[in-house]
Image (cartoon, helix red, strand yellow):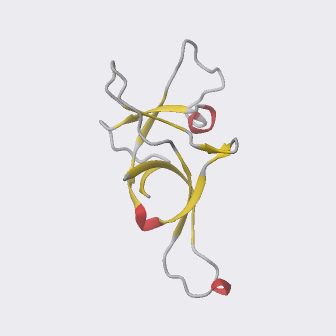
């Protein structure tokens, strides 16, 4: 299936590790899609964690399907630390905006 992940780095292995021609990507996972929000009809995702740390993995760059757009999910109040440049670091819960296909720092990845 398809999962949302934030791409943190794209790299190749140094020659000392042998010939490995494919580029790799270090990603931080989001949870599988939750049911759509009734008012916006957007599916929801949250940061995926393991042992209180972000769930991360190294995947082949060719497993990335396309960029996607996430919107921070607000509660009763807005976190005053939230800015456009740090939204993925400050927020934990997001709406998956399938109505837009922008160039963002998040990618849909085939697991």
| Residue sitting at the far front | 51
- State the residue in front, 25 or 48: 48
Residue 36: image quadrant is top left
Name which residue lies at 50% across and 42% down.
31
Give the x, y percent position of residue 74: 52, 21
- State the residue in front, 60 or 67: 60
Instruction: Tell whether 80 sits left or right of 109.
Output: right
Give the x, y percent position of residue 75: 54, 17
Residue 87: image quadrant is top right
Please determine whether, in this image, residue 29 is positioned above or below residue 86. Answer: below
Instruction: Tell whether 27 sits left or right of 51.
Output: left
Q: Quadrant of the C terminus?
A: bottom left
Give the x, y percent position of residue 81: 66, 25
Please determine whether, in this image, residue 110 is positioned above or below residue 51. Answer: below
| Residue sitting at the far top | 76
Give the x, y percent position of residue 64: 42, 59
Name which residue lies at 53% across and 31% down.
93
């Amino acid at each position: 299936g398809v999962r949302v992940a934030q791409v943190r780095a794209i790299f190749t292995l140094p020659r000392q590790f042998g010939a490995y021609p494919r580029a790799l990507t270090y990603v931080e996972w989001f949870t599988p899609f939750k049911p759509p929000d009734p008012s916006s009809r957007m599916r929801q995702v949250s940061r995926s964690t393991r042992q209180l740390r972000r769930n991360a993995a190294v995947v082949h760059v060719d497993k990335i399907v396309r960029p996607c757009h996430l919107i921070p999910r607000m509660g009763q109040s807005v976190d005053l630390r939230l800015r456009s440049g740090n939204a993925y670091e400050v927020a934990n819960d997001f709406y998956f905006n399938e109505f837009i296909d922008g160039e963002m720092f998040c990618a849909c990845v085939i697991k």
